[in-house]
Image: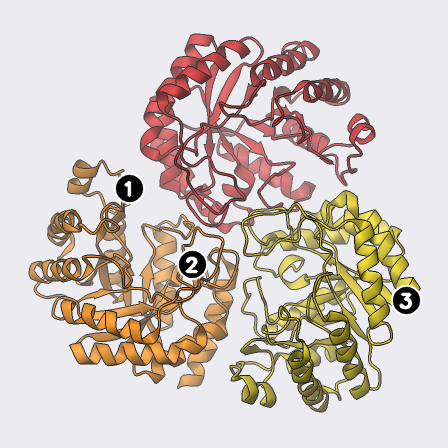
Chain colours: A yellow, B orange, C red
Amino acid sequence: MKITGTFIDEISHDIPHQNWGRAEWDADFAHMKSIGIDTVIMIRSGYRKFITYPSTYLTKQFGCYAPSTDLVELFLQLADKHGMRFYFGLYDSGTYWDTGNLQPEIDTNRFVIDEVWQRYGHYTSFGGWYISTEISRRTKGAIEAFRTLGLQCKSVSNGLPTFISPWIDGKKAVLAASATLSKADAVSVNEHEREWSEIFEGIAGAVDAVAFQDGHIDYDELPAFFEVNKKMADRFGLQCWTNAESFDRDMPIKFLPIKFDKLRLKLEAAAKAGYDKAITFEFSHFMSPQSAYLQAGHLYNRYNEYLDTLI
Amino acid sequence: MKITGTFIDEISHDIPHQNWGRAEWDADFAHMKSIGIDTVIMIRSGYRKFITYPSTYLTKQFGCYAPSTDLVELFLQLADKHGMRFYFGLYDSGTYWDTGNLQPEIDTNRFVIDEVWQRYGHYTSFGGWYISTEISRRTKGAIEAFRTLGLQCKSVSNGLPTFISPWIDGKKAVLAASATLSKADAVSVNEHEREWSEIFEGIAGAVDAVAFQDGHIDYDELPAFFEVNKKMADRFGLQCWTNAESFDRDMPIKFLPIKFDKLRLKLEAAAKAGYDKAITFEFSHFMSPQSAYLQAGHLYNRYNEYLDTLI
Amino acid sequence: MKITGTFIDEISHDIPHQNWGRAEWDADFAHMKSIGIDTVIMIRSGYRKFITYPSTYLTKQFGCYAPSTDLVELFLQLADKHGMRFYFGLYDSGTYWDTGNLQPEIDTNRFVIDEVWQRYGHYTSFGGWYISTEISRRTKGAIEAFRTLGLQCKSVSNGLPTFISPWIDGKKAVLAASATLSKADAVSVNEHEREWSEIFEGIAGAVDAVAFQDGHIDYDELPAFFEVNKKMADRFGLQCWTNAESFDRDMPIKFLPIKFDKLRLKLEAAAKAGYDKAITFEFSHFMSPQSAYLQAGHLYNRYNEYLDTLI
């Protein structure tokens, strides 16, 4: 299973910034392309007051800080240049997702979607929307919000595809800022299937693909969960992608690049379950030859050797 | 607002050591100089049994370990060579600051100050003293201790300048070794002003500048706190510096280089408040092209581009 | 005291993987050799389902994952090439050591030892066995398990040497995944001596050397503990090695390379106590010029300068 997409982690929640300029991003898109990545997904256009593009609306509405670079423009220009498809990640106010009242989040993103499509919709590479909120089974109101947001995206952009990337509520589903690495009350495969079938049913037609994050369950749980995910996706007419995390969740340093064999196990499980596409979170920190984490460059080399064995 | 000073993090509390020798430090002073840094501050001359110079007094009194390099001599020689001003950070026994009885700390530093001035006072670059203890509003006995220590420094060195770098007791004022990133009982601007006015009044004349660490409050709180800091400094005749932290407090890895736009926001807030000088904690790990954290080199480049826009 | 051995951290518990291939490992063995390392110890052959070599037995018994590289073969080939001695670290199921019933662990390793010796025993560099479980004073059943495992290793391999590397239950004996750096209920030197004398007596004849990890006690406690360790080792006819940890236990980032002077203090304490050999955990992450942690390369340089002063 080849990785053909990657998130771009702007605005980052929990991965320290690399402080790249245009030259570094340009080189990184070339690195991505060289291993077959054709899709880049900007993980979110903003979080609270930090935003990726000089949004008139967000600045006025929330007092967001002016970014020194228009990253949306930069990424679209580079995606055009390198022949890649760009997905735009929606804004996250950081306020409403935990409250159960998601209407303000939906309303805000209606403005963001309009503004962004008007400003950047003409780029050839503008290829889809990423509904950026990461939920799991217990996020109240998520179905309705995902459905509405997905339809808003599609209606403004002549039906460009949308996707989400939720997490499985597994044993490793702990906060990045906590010291622990695992928890006891993990979801079972059956619960996962029951709860997510309901969600899939509710979002079908508004969301085209679901890319579950693959790092919250243990390696020997991958086959069972992946099989169920694919079955649900097929049943409700969604594409089933995997979000192959290229960072290691098992280590006290949160987070550095993953050990190659762990990534391989996850990709092999996705291939075996017949998944449609593999994307990763994310190339630039964890798999890039120019990452500040030098382990990433070695992972890039190991991954390339692995690609050679697939041919 | 240009950064014109940096701490040198020896002896480090919580930032892993880079194991540099003379060659690396020499190169780093040149890097500092190239972006306009004219002031280096050795953050402390010792902490508990680890010391930066072969102190006869501290070795005898506390059984301190002999350092393999005399870092005070090294830094003074390099400051001389590169035409920079060196501030000497006082010794911290690690014992008394939490007890409310600071007399032993004062007594110890009387010997340290004498010893250091006698041994190193002839260096051209020996330009001031840093009263190294980091306090916030609730440190008992701090006023008297700061006053006495400042006067001791001045009396022995013909009035060389002194400064302190306390922290604002804001929402991000949590221990580096804790897993959390923020706390609930943050200080308000009004409390901050009331409590620090009392401290400023008590230390005026003995301490010449106060460089509050800028990383414990949120970005949108900067203007209010900075305005009050400047007002208090003016009122009591102190210089108002900012200690612009170049590491990121919002990430699970404690600590890696800060995202450039965050540093920019903090520097712009200091400029707007009319601050007198900006120093950083600290160049060598977080902004240097030769830092072990490669993000630092990129921050250096982004900062240089920013300097170009200021001209 | 010169470091002449190093662990190789495969399979890692808590240090993020560097993703090296054969070329990087070959270069690293050369770097090790250049500072006088003649012994490499693979820290464990497997942990739970991750294993270092394609074990027929472990795969069948526990469903272990097939590794993409046979690391045991790789390390033995490189040890042969560079003229070094290789110690094989036993398998750790991750299941029994906390239960007090260690018989399954012993039984499993009987098969592993046989399989490994049959498959790899012909390599010139196969020079010993590392009983990989890290225990401290309170591990129930450890004496009998160590004794049996040691004898199993010896009987199959014509008496090749065995060693263990336990930890002192000192103030820094906290879990890597905890946020804290120290604890209150540390062992005293007397308790340590009483409890470990009993263990040493029980394992004498089956275990040839004990290499206590040197990082769980404070620097000024090193002389007292090291003296007792050496006394016990002499009394029961064991070799006394030190496991000089080259990572820093005092920092919030768990773990990066240690400050050179800290390593030096520990090595000097071991020399003073008359220790027989110094090994380190571990060269490749924390002391290697090609480590992803660039501080390691500087530590390598500082250590080399230190070696020059020893001659």
Q: SS of the residue at dot 3?
A: helix
Crowd tier of the residue under label 1, counting other residues whose Cα lies within 10 Å: few below 14, some 14–19, many 20 or above: some
Q: Chain of mark 3?
A: A
Q: Which residue is mark 1?
A: B67
Q: Which residue is mark 2?
A: B285
Q: Which mark is residue C49?
A: none
Q: Are marks 2 and 3 on the same chain?
A: no
Q: Quadrant of the N terminus of chain C?
A: top left
Report whether residue B264 is seen.
no
Q: Is residue B208 above or below residue B8?
A: below
Assess whether mark 1 and mark 2 are in contact (beta carbons under 8 angstroms): no
Report whether residue A226 is seen.
yes
Q: Nearer the viewer, residue C280 or A231?
A: A231
Q: Chain of mark 2?
A: B
Q: Which residue is mark 3?
A: A236
Q: Is residue C48 above or below residue C196?
A: below
Q: Amino acid at mark 3?
A: Phe
Q: Chain of mark 1?
A: B
Counting from the top left corner in percent of width and height, residue A291 is at 60, 60
The residue located at (32%, 64%) in the rendering is B167
Q: Is residue B133 left or right of residue C194?
A: left
Q: Is residue C110 left or right of residue C161?
A: right
Crowd tier of the residue under label 2, counting other residues whose Cα lies within 10 Å: few below 14, some 14–19, many 20 or above: many
Q: Amino acid at mark 1?
A: Pro
The residue located at (54%, 35%) in the rendering is C32
Q: Nearer the viewer, residue B52 or C26?
A: B52
Marks 2, 3: nearer the viewer: 3
